[in-house]
Image (cartoon, rainbow, N blue to C red):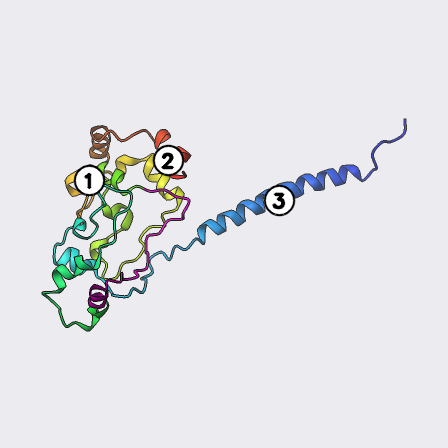
Amino acid sequence: MAQIFHRAANTLAKATLYGIVLLIAAICIIAWEVNNSYNVYLGEHQVQPVPFSHKHHVTDDGIDCRYCHTSVETSSFAGIPPTHTCMSCHSKIWVNSPMLEPVRESYLTDQSITWVRVNELPDFVYFNHSIHIAKGIGCTTCHGPIGDMPITYRANTLYMRWCINCHKHPWRYVRPKQYVFSATYKPPPDQDALGRKLVKEYHIQSPRIITDCYTCHR
């Protein structure tokens, strides 16, 4: 019987299979690198129109997070304070400070200050602040030591795998609700036991439900 395939067919078939495997690997590596290069600026201070200090306002002056971020308990968005919130104090103190001239100009012209987003997620990611607050996840869990930041920077990558790690082990991060807005809270030595107790008390759902794709990608 005559040979159907050319002698080079085996070599060609092997080369094709190896090529497909290498192509898939290359696509995965490229996707990984693109994901890791997404506008993170981890630990880098962003230049703002006004050098706002969380350390000064939160730690030194004791201002509660909710005074400026008014919608954090009721909305997916924490809220950027309007200029009149700033002026509720700075119409009385530091009234002639050159550093605060953009704030005064914004107040007089009714033009919002264009702040640079520090903790920014892609448009295809949905995140709800109010749900996390209600479940005992503190501000510093995601935003880092915000009370020690003279200029705000991104403390965590906010990558998908970073979020999933928390959702798979919520007892490691949950805290008593009265400390959610504390900038100085430190997990106690018995965090594992306390966290597991709070997971039940706050009815934190199982990781399988929480990490369903639709939860974050709508």
Write down the region rendered in magenta.
Answer: 103-127
In the rendered structure, the answer to whether residue 19 lies left or right of residue 143 reads right
In the rendered structure, the answer to whether residue 37 lies left or right of residue 113 reads right
Q: Nearer the viewer, mark 1 or mark 2?
A: 2
Q: Position of residue 215 (x, y in %)?
A: 37, 35
Q: For residue 60: magenta? A: no
Q: Which residue is mark 3?
A: 22
Q: Secondary structure at mark 1?
A: loop
Given residues 95 and 193, the one toward you in this image is 95
Given residues 203 and 185, the one toward you in this image is 203
The tag earlier along the polypeptide, 2 or 3, is 3
Q: Residue furthest right?
A: 1
Tell whether label 2 touches label 1 (CB within 8 Å): no
Q: Main secondary structure of the magenta part?
A: loop
Res. 202 mark: none
Res. 215 mark: 2
Type of amino acid under label 2: Thr
- Regarding residue 164, the answer to whether it shows in the image is yes
The tag earlier along the polypeptide, 1 or 3, is 3
Q: Position of residue 195 (x, y in %)?
A: 23, 34
Q: Residues within 10 Å of mark 3 (few under 14, many from 20)?
A: few
Q: Which residue is mark 1?
A: 189
